[in-house]
Amino acid sequence: MKLHRIKALFLRHLYPLRRDFDLLSDMLYWPLIDTLLWGITSQWLAETSGEANVALSILMALLMWNIIWRAQSEISRNLIDEIWNNNLVNLFSTPLMVREWLVSVMALSVIKMTFTLTIITTVIVGMWQANLLFFGWWLLPFIAAMVTTGWWIGFISAGIILRFGPKMQTVVWTLPGALLPFSAVFFPLERFPETLQIVSRMVPTTYIFETMRALAAGGAINWQALLFSFGFNFLYLALAIWYFVRSMRYSVKLGLGRFN
């Protein structure tokens, strides 16, 4: 791999931020709307239920879900941008390697995710005085797990688009949403029907959100849950990258010109 090619591709997707309102709204507008909506809702639930930890749990869940969304969006959305701009053939007719593209979009997702996270955190702390540092150093593995989840969702989405064409581009927005109901984001796993709990236990984010709620309620860290989360995440990430690479080879065999 060559660093200058990774850097060039990184900058190629970073420069449009100065003039592309769609990208800015995706990074700022919708996360802020979600923050205001769920921030007010969490405060109301905390006041009516008398449970102070409810607000913290909901706000942290919102924060973590935005990490997943940002991480996956930068992978699948960047690919679809190349297709929309008829640039996919130009891009991969250069010496650029697939693994260089992978590293570039993953690094870009971390940068943009950090920017969005900083804005949301500032609003949450400024408006609702939520003590997000309550979780201490556990925030780091929580964030790492969410980023990894976002990556494998993004690679699956990108692989589907490469294999089946732009007609499947809706997976960029629908695939993360399909994971949302099974992740126990805003409510405990025990509230699920027993059949759906089986599915939820195979979703790595479920264990993170359950652990966060337990900590917010004054409980102890569940090491087994964290191991399950990272185990599933690494397995799914490996499978997602494998699927993406296979889809890329399949698409190259058919001809990338079909995307123009």
Image: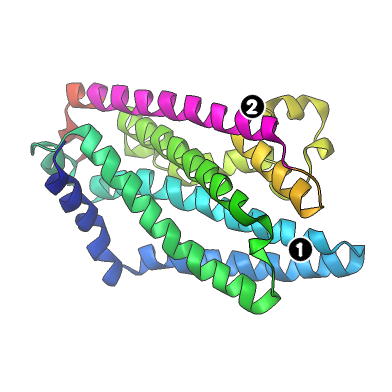
Pointer 2: what residue? 202
Q: Residue 191, image x and y in percent?
A: 83, 39
Q: Horizontal placement of 182 versus 217: left or right?
A: left
Residue visible at 21% across and 57% down in the picture: 11
* Residue 177 is inside the magenta segment: no
- CA neighbours of label 2 inside 10 A, class few (<14), some (14 to 19), many (20+): some
Pointer 1: what residue? 55
Residues in magenta?
A: 221-250
Q: Residue 218, image x and y in percent?
A: 81, 52
Q: Residue 169, image x and y in percent?
A: 39, 41
- CA neighbours of label 1 inside 10 A, class few (<14), some (14 to 19), many (20+): many
Question: In the rendered view, how is the structure colored?
Answer: rainbow
- Alpha-carbon distance for marks 2 and 1? 27 Å
The answer to whether 209 is drawn above or below residue 134 in the figure is above
Return the residue nearer the eye: 141 or 193. Answer: 141
Residue visible at 61% across and 64% down in the picture: 34
